[in-house]
Amino acid sequence: MQKDNSSVKDNMHSQLLFQQKELAQRCLDIAGVILVALDGEQKVAMINRKGCELFGHREDEIIGKNWFDEFLPDEDRERTRTGFKKYIGADIESMAKFENFIRTKSGENRLIAWSNTLLKDENGRIIGTLSSGEDITERKKAEEALRTSEATMRSILQAAPIGIGIIKNRTFYFVNDYACQVSGYAKEELLGQSARMIYETEEEFQRVGEEVYRHIAEKGVGIIETRFKTKNGDLIDVYLSAAPLDPSDSEQGFTFTAMDITRQKQNIEYLKKSEVQLRSLAAHLQTIREDERGAIAREIHDELAQVLTALKMDLSLIEMDIKERDEIFSLAKLSKDIVMMQSLIDATIKKLRRLITELRPEALDNLGLVPAIEWQIKDFQSRSGVRCDFQMNRKELSLDKNREIAIFRIIQEALTNIGRHARAKTVKVTIDQKLRHIVIRIIDDGVGFSMDILDNPKSFGLLGMKERAIVFGGSCIIESNKAAGTTVTVTLPTGE
Ligand SMILES: Nc1ncnc2c1ncn2[C@@H]1O[C@H](COP(=O)(O)OP(=O)(O)OP(=O)(O)O)[C@@H](O)[C@H]1O
Ligand SMILES: [Mg+2]
C-alpha cells in the first residue's frame, strides 16, 4: 500500500513536469519575439519557432551549431563574438542590449535588437545566455529614410534663394534662413510673432490675408504681389505664394514662399523708361534729319546759288564790256572785278568747307580719329574761348570706322553742350585705350545740372550720346553736380 502510494506520487510528479515543459515550449513558440539560448561554447541550445521562421531553417538545422560561425554575416561576426565572450565572462554592462545582423537561409541580412540575460546553474556558474530579439530591419530602414528625407528637406530649405516658412493663424511658426536674410530679422524675432510686423500698414496686412485666403479657396494656392517692410525700414517688393498644409483644415497652417522681386521691378521700370526715351529719340532723329536737310538746302540756296548768280551776272557784264569795247572798259576795271569775284569765290569755298565739315568731318576720313579730335578741340577752343586739355595714353587708336564716328560725335555733342550750357573755364578730354575697351572722359568745371534732366525724354543730346555707346555694347555715364561741373564717361568695347 505504501509502495503503491509512492509510485502514484512519482507518476503524478513526472506528469506535472511534462506538463510544465510543454507549457514552457508553447510559451516560447507563441512569443512574438525571437528567443535564442547559447551555451558556453557559443552553440545554440534552444531557439523558438519565431527564430526558426526568421532564419528559414528547421529547429534541428540550428540546434547545436555555432551561432556566430553559422548564422551571422562575416562583417558582424567577430564584433558580436567578442561581445558574447565578454558577457559570459560576467561583463554585464557590455551586452545587456545589443544590435547585430544575422544571415537567413536565403542569404538575406536582418538587423536584430537583442535583450540578453545570463543563464546560470544551481551553483551560480554562468553556463550560457538567453536572448530575446526583435527584427528591426524595416524600422531602421524607415528611420534612415526619414532621417535622409529630413536632411534633404533641411538642405533644400537652406539652399533655396527664396524665403520659405510656415504660418499658423498668421503667426510665424517656421522660417528658413533666407526669409530672415530678406526681412532682416533673426529667427527668434520672427517665430511666434504676428506676420503684421513685416507689413508697412494694417490695410496691406489685411488685404494680403484676404486675397491669399480667397485664392486658396478658389485654386488651392494663393499668389499675390505685396511689399514687406524689413527690420531697418526698407520696403521690398515681394512675390508671395501660400498653400495650406492640410487643404481640409486651414487651422493646420500654411506654407509660404516669398521671393524678393525688388530688382526685377526696378529693371522693368528702367526698361519702360528706356522704351519711352528711345521712342522719343527715334522720332526726334527723324525730325532732325528733316531739319538738317532743310538747313543744307537753305545754305546751298542762300549762299551758293546767290553767289553763283552774282558771279554769272559779273561775268555777263564783263562779256558785254569786251563785246562793245566801250570807253568805260579798261583793264584796270577788269582786274578789280576779277579780284572781287575771287574773294567772293574764296568766301564761298570757306562756307562750303564748313558745311561739308559739319556734315562729315574731313579730318576723320583723311587723317583718322586722333587728329580729327585734336582739330575738333582746337576749333572748340578758338570758338568758345574755353581752355581745353587733351590727353591720351596711346599715340594711336585701333578702332573701326563706325566706332571712330561714334566717339567723334559723342565728343562733339559733349563739347557743344559745354559751349552752350556749362559756362566752364576749362575742359579736359582724356582717352584711355585698355586691352579690350576704350574709356573716354569729357570733364568740365562749369555750372552742372540736375540729374532729373537725364530722365527727361527730351534730352536728346544726352540720350544720343548714350545710344551711340550702347549700340557697340558700351555705356555712357553722365555725372553732374552744381558744385563740380559735369563729367561724361564713355566706355566702348574695342570689338577686337
Ligand atoms: N556740360 C553741361 N553743363 C551744364 N549743363 C548741361 C551740360 N550738358 C547738358 N546740360 C544740360 O542738360 C540739358 C540736356 O542736354 P541735351 O544735350 O540733351 O540737350 P540740349 O543741349 O539742350 O539740346 P540738343 O538736343 O540740341 O543737344 C541741357 O539743356 C542742359 O541744361
Ligand atoms: Mg546738347
Image (cartoon, helix red, strand yellow):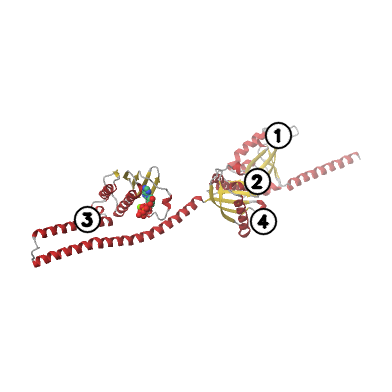
Which mark is on residue 35? Answer: none
Foreground residue among 183 and 334: 334
The N terminus, quarter of image: top right
Per the model, the C-alpha gap separating discs 3 and 2 is 104 Å
Quarter of the image for residue 212 reads bottom right
**Residue 449 pos. (x, y %):** 40, 47
Distance from the alpha carbon under mark 1 to that under mark 4: 61 Å
Residue marked by disc 1:
126
Q: Does 141 sit above or below residue 215?
A: above
Tags 1 and 4 touching, CB below 8 Å: no
Q: CA distance from mark 4 to mark 3?
A: 90 Å
The CA span between labels 1 and 3 is: 127 Å
Q: Nearer the viewer, mark 1 or mark 3?
A: 3
Q: Of marks 1 and 4, which one's residue comes earlier in the chain?
A: 1
Say if disc 3 is inside 8 Å of ligand 1.
Answer: no
**Label of residue 350 in the image:** 3
Q: Is mark 1 within 8 Å of ligand 1?
A: no
Residue appearing at x 65%, y 44% in the figure: 112
Viewer-nearest of labels 2 and 1? 2
Residue nearest the viewer, comparing 392 with 178: 392
Mark 4 = which residue?
A: 248
Q: Nearer the viewer, mark 4 or mark 2?
A: 4
Circle 3: residue type: Lys
Label 3, secondary structure: give it. helix
Q: As shown in the figure, which amino acid type bears the numbered disc 2?
A: Ile
Q: Give the Cα distance between marks 2 and 1.
A: 29 Å
Q: What's the residue at 25%, 61% (across, down)?
A: 302
Helix, strand or loop under label 4: loop
Q: Nearer the viewer, residue 425 or 37?
A: 425
Residue ID for mark 2: 136
